[in-house]
Amino acid sequence: AQSVTQLDSHVSVSEGTPVLLRCNYSSSYSPSLFWYVQHPNKGLQLLLKYTSAATLVKGINGFEAEFKKSETSFHLTKPSAHMSDAAEYFCVVRGTGANNLFFGTGTRLTVIP
Amino acid sequence: EAGVAQSPRYKIIEKRQSVAFWCNPISGHATLYWYQQILGQGPKLLIQFQNNGVVDDSQLPKDRFSAERLKGVDSTLKIQPAKLEDSAVYLCASSLYVAGDGGELFFGEGSRLTVL
């Protein structure tokens, strides 16, 4: 079975400082992994996805994530936080067979001015 | 390109009442999903359609929830009768690719249900 664990329910950073949102996955095969962002009262938006190509994946808005098989991790990073980055972030793994996604519990990012 | 449309955005009902949510996916997207997102949790799949057929409804509480996608385009999710624990945001998503090798899922803004 596939699952993801987001290690922090809430992360707070100052504007202009780096962002690190942590995610570990569990999968019996080479997984497809995603990060989605959800702004208040908005739909989920895809930030980036890993599908067994390059292990360092670049996404929108300056975010990137690195797939580390030895650590079963897929952490999301950004060099410099912006106020508009404040949102809920979900790490997601794709299940087998049907195109179903399994979501983590989310990390709320707060950016302090 | 128009996104996934959902309505209503907000609904407040009393327990044991019924409610229906509507979703119109992105034009041409064959796959449609309904997710339930309870406060403080990640979204959980309720049902997945491929055109007008059901691919996966294993997590749908069929004693009270039903969904249909007539004509393989828009979809309706119904809850009858509602329970307090059904309070959640109901997210609709659509995808261009067929099941098994899917691409990106595009989500609507959700329908927030409060059951009193």
Image: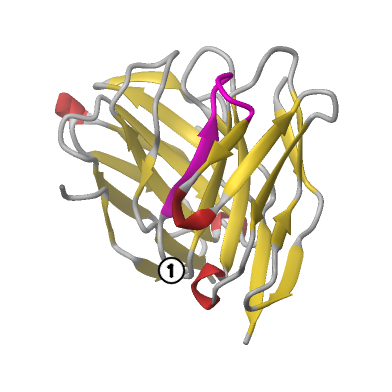
From the viewer's side, name the closer residue of A56 and B42. Answer: A56
State the residue lying farthest toward the right. Answer: A71
Give me the residue at 28% from left, 42% from top. B76
From the viewer's side, name the closer residue of B24 and A68. Answer: A68
Q: Quadrant of the C terminus of chain A?
A: bottom right
Percent position (x, y) of residue A21? 72, 54
Percent position (x, y) of residue B19? 36, 56
Q: Which residues are magenta?
A: A44-55
Q: Is residue B60 visible?
A: no
**Residue at mark 1:** A41
Give me the residue at 19% from left, 26% from top. B72
Give me the residue at 70% from left, 64% from top. A18
From the viewer's side, name the closer residue of B26 and B54. Answer: B26
In the rendered structure, the answer to whether residue A19 lies left or right of residue B63 reads: right
Quarter location, residue B102: top left
Quarter location, residue B7: bottom left
In the rendered structure, the answer to whether residue A32 lies left or right of residue B66 reads: right
Q: Is residue A65 visible?
A: yes
For badge 1, the amino acid type reads Asn
Tell me, yes or no, whether the highlighted magenta stretch contains residue B81: no
Q: Is residue B84 above or below residue B68?
A: below
Q: Is residue B43 above or below residue B67?
A: below
Please report, as a chain letter, where disc 1 is located. A
